[in-house]
Image: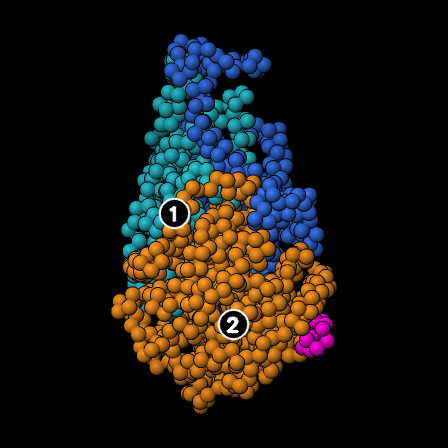
Chain colours: A orange, B cyan, C blue
Amino acid sequence: MSANLSRRGFLAAGGGLSLAAVLGLSGCGDSNSDSSSGDGAKDLKLLLPGAVPDGWAAVLEAVNKKLQADLGFSITPQFINWNNYGSQALLKFTAGEKFETALQARWLNMAQLVGSGSLVDVGPLVTGGKYPNLQKTLNDKLIELNKWSGKLWGIPQVNSAGRIHHFAIRQDLAEKYGITEITDYPTLEKFWYDVKQRDPRVTPIALSQNQSNLTCVPGPVAMFNAASWENANRIAQSFSGGSMPFFLAENAKETGSSDPVPFWELDGVVDALRTIRKYYQDGIINRDALNVDAATTKGLFTNGQTASAWATTDGLSSTTLLPGLQKAVKGAQLANVVPLKGGKSAKPNQTFQADNFTVLNAKGASNERAMQLEDWLSIKENHDLISYGVEGKDWKPVGADKFEQLSTYAFPGFALCWRTSLERRSALMTESEADWFSWAQDYDNFTVDTFASFIPDVNPVKREEAQISQAFTQYGNPLFFGAVDVDAGLDKLKKAVSSAGLDKLQTELAKQADEYLKTVK
Amino acid sequence: MSTSTAAGRRTVEPFTVISVICVTVFGLLCLIPFWMIIAGSFTDESKLSVSGYSLFPDPFSLEAYRTIFTGPAVLSAYRASIFITVVGTALSLAATSGISWVIARRLPYISRPLAIFTYIPMLFTGGLVPMYLLVTQYLNLQNSLFAVILPLLVAPFLVFIQVSFFRQLPEEILESARVDGASELRIFFQIGLPLSKPILAVIALFYAVTYWNEWFHALLFISDTEKYPLQLLLQNLISSVTNAATLPQSTAQAAPVYQLRLALTAVTIGPILLAYPFAQRYFVKGLTLGATKG
Amino acid sequence: MRANSLVMESGSEPGTDDAVPPQRPADPPRTPAKRPRRRPPLGLVLLALPAIAFFVVFSYAPMAGLVVAFKDFSISDGVFGSPWSGLDNFRYFFSTGDAPRILANTLFLNTLFLGATLLTGITLAVMLNEIRVKLFKRAIQSVIFFPYFVSPIVISIILQVLLAGVGGSGGAANDLLHVFNLPQVEWYTQPGPWPWILTVVKIWQLGGYLSIIFLAAITAIPEEVYEAGMIDGASRTQMAFRITVPLLRPTAAVLLVLGIGRIFYGDFGTIYAIVGDNGTLFPTTDVIDTYVFRSLRQLGDFGSTAAVGLFQSVVGFVLVVLAVLVQRRYAKESSIL
């Protein structure tokens, strides 16, 4: 049985790939499907990630009551836990199930689903004027730049315009060392060394295994890449997440030639690798980044064991970190540090690609109802109900656009109803975070990247890509966490990727990017 | 006989001493992590995050257990899990014993093909999608607890374990019963099974463990939260806690990560540890006889 | 009773079999005629029916899905709609330069795991058999079964506490090395010791579990055998090695053959939870399952995954057939197939 279990463990953990043997039954799936499609339209099935929120029954009842009165149908969301969401959603698409909407993203299986025609192009629906509430909440730039080859394959779910990775730091410690505000990278580095010296039991910053692509390859900034904080105007491109990043020519628009180069040829990247190696040796970063998960590093921070944590401009670091931190460490303060040169006038590059999309299932019972639902959720009252729960019980409004959490209700809004203009801010949000969050919500604070809506198609180089991402995990990650010597490690990585087909990948990327350049001109 | 036993008891042989020492050491190696998990599950997160472990629940904290047991679904989850475990184990034990007996009898033209027939599924599996379609579209078992039980009904591994045990039963007893005119079925029920209590206990225990720990088929086939078995509930909990750090959620769960992981292990093991002594009775009794009388 | 059975070896048939219809269909005349079985064993076959039905429905029917290994799969086309791609999917794994290393790792680690866990299981069972204080024995038995329930994630956490400590510098093992003035080891960047660390983990995890199977087998050993040994003046040591161990051989053989069939499957759950994406440990720990999981998790290439799975199954099948042939030659009694 042990053998059986381990085999199943493989299937379970294998997620998407464990759909290993897909049976012909899927061919018969359609003819056999239920006769209840009429009912299907009266009760929409939605796939949502995560656990069922606390107090969900009451919220769902209120939502359905109102929905029934307004539009004449109800919803039945199915929550699938995060570790299994990707594979389960793909499985349901493959089996031809008739759910209406799902969360998808490039980091899930969106490209595959688009390729196989499983999704509905919502572009014409969103801009057609039929769903005014929805249309009002979606920025034109957001819609335009999230189209893949002219088609919008899902409703982009964002709560800000641009997303810049940065740090949440212990402001109380900084003040203890006489640093009032950190606005540039050298000061930040000094802060870390101060922590190391003055509070040797606190690790200045802890990284987790899923952050390898954030440490030195700019997108447009990288945590320890000083050059990227100086000049945040380059964004790496790759065929899929977690694989070989390339940089395309800065002046591609003028020359019409994308000329991609491997990430190590960009100025500042190798320096960043050396910096990280130094941090690793000096104990500025943790030594077990290759093995710890994000929950652990977060736990370390909220318990005062580390002095900085990863953050991004989604306005959520205060809510996630502050309550736990203040409970464990008396008098702890949090500040969001974005050490961009030029601060809020830096105008870093952005692609404005949404991290998440609500997609419509092409085999769903009623795509029209699904759009009506999205429209309905774009009305502030409805949006607040499903996002924050029952007013007075789960939350209460603070001012016009803030809220205070009263219960532990937590809805995965980014899978269904994130609308930049409707999101309320947590009353807990620190001033420094609120500042940066407001900044990030304005499209004019960013520069549109030349390759903003370029989504490379991996199919022609699938095999090479798989092997290169393999080499990347083996030789790249240790390098990005400073666990190996830079020169020797980079050498090994270069050898491994070139024997796995770097040239072919590079040529293919150049071809596709040049093609793309013609369309933007 | 009794004198020789007494003599055997007086003279302590080196092998016995070595055995006691080795088994004790191995036992301790299992016990210490067990204690670390239990103690850790009652220790405050602030200490766990510093040292990673804790040998004494100090500072004491029930936070993790509170997180687990406050959910409204826990009670129904226990109900579902117990149903799956009890009904599943009973059905599995019946089906497995049946086929094992037939294979064990070495019937020409039947036993060997049947053994191969049983073995092949251990190596070749059709994968997830066929299974999914089978259960949801052909058997229509969505939201039925049998969708969790049936796919696990017979484990080839345990069939072969049982076969090898059945084959060690003294052939003479069976043969004499046959002579006495007992039918094959009666031999199985009235002689084979009663003689096989130890292996039945082991097989039942292993099936019970499998069913108790089962969550994957529940994830696939059960969407009605009222019917979630305990393990799926716990999987969901740990998944949302571990992913909270990387996900944009309007409110993040501020649950104690380290402590919760340990507490989940404790909650999982608990009921099995209660069931274990019942099964143990059968294989320890046989043993004791073998050892002391021998 | 025993006397009876000896005399009645070839069994006349006084009674009638309830479950068996009067005609006697299936008994073929070519049966080796030493013990002619007069009665058609249909009653017995009934016993096997539920399990047979289970295998047909839940194992064999879904196996049709294996054809995807030869297909260029697309979600909307389904298996039969997707175009054939011949052996293209198989090329993915075997064209990587890493294939020899990964195959070698898989074989080496699994052989190590299989041998070590079986040995531990037998040893524990035999040794437990020596313990006569009932309460102690029961307690130990419960305790050694426990690791089987510890999830790989928790094992991974315990290992990190032992080998790395919080923050990755230190750990109990290094504290111990320090006591003996030995140099500190950065375990999580040194691939060398990992096959042995993983083996220890497997022993810990499965030793107690397997010992239960052997304990049950020991109960099947008749009292008389020990009594006879006692009368011959055999010591306990001798009885353990000359009586108990040989009688455990059939069970061990079954477990061994079953294990050989799965030797090309890695223990994905445990290895992945412990090693994860830590590339510095791959030289010694990367097995087929972890490799395939990593390289395809982004692309979700079903065809290639199925191809690798089929390869694992077929190789396992061939190995099992060989193992069974060897077994039939040298130890016919314990042959499982």
Dot 2: element: helix
Tell me if A235 is positioned left or right of A367 in this view.
Answer: right
Instruction: Left or right? Give the position of C42 relative to A185.
Output: left
Residue A140, which numbered label? 2
Judging from the image, mark 1 belongs to the subunit labelled A
Q: Residue at x 49, y 27 (%)?
A: B103
Mark 2 neighbour class, 10 Å CA radius: few under 14, some 14 to 19, many 20 or more: few
Q: Position of residue A29 (x, y in %)?
A: 51, 42
Q: Residues within 10 Å of mark 1 (few under 14, many from 20)?
A: few
Q: Is residue A275 above or below residue A58?
A: below
Q: Is residue C163 magenta?
A: no
Between the residue at mark 1 and the residue at mark 2, the CA separation in whole angstroms equals 35 Å
Quadrant for the C terminus of chain C, please.
top right
Residue extent of the magenta highlight:
A250-265
Horizontal arrangement in the rendering, residue C301 relative to residue B130 (left or right) = right
Residue C289 seen: no
Q: Are marks 1 and 2 in contact (CB under 8 Å)?
A: no
The furthest residue to the left: A392
Q: Disc 2 residue type? A: Asp
Mark 2 chain: A
The N terminus of chain C, quarter of image: top left
Closest to the observer, C86 or C35:
C86
Quick one: B11 or C257, which is closer to the camera?
A: C257
On whether disc 1 and disc 2 are found on a single subunit, the reply is yes
Q: Could you say which quadrant of the image residue C262 lies in?
A: top right
The residue wearing badge 1 is: A39
**Residue B243 locus on image (x, y percent):** 44, 63
Q: Residue at x 52, y 25 (%)?
A: B111
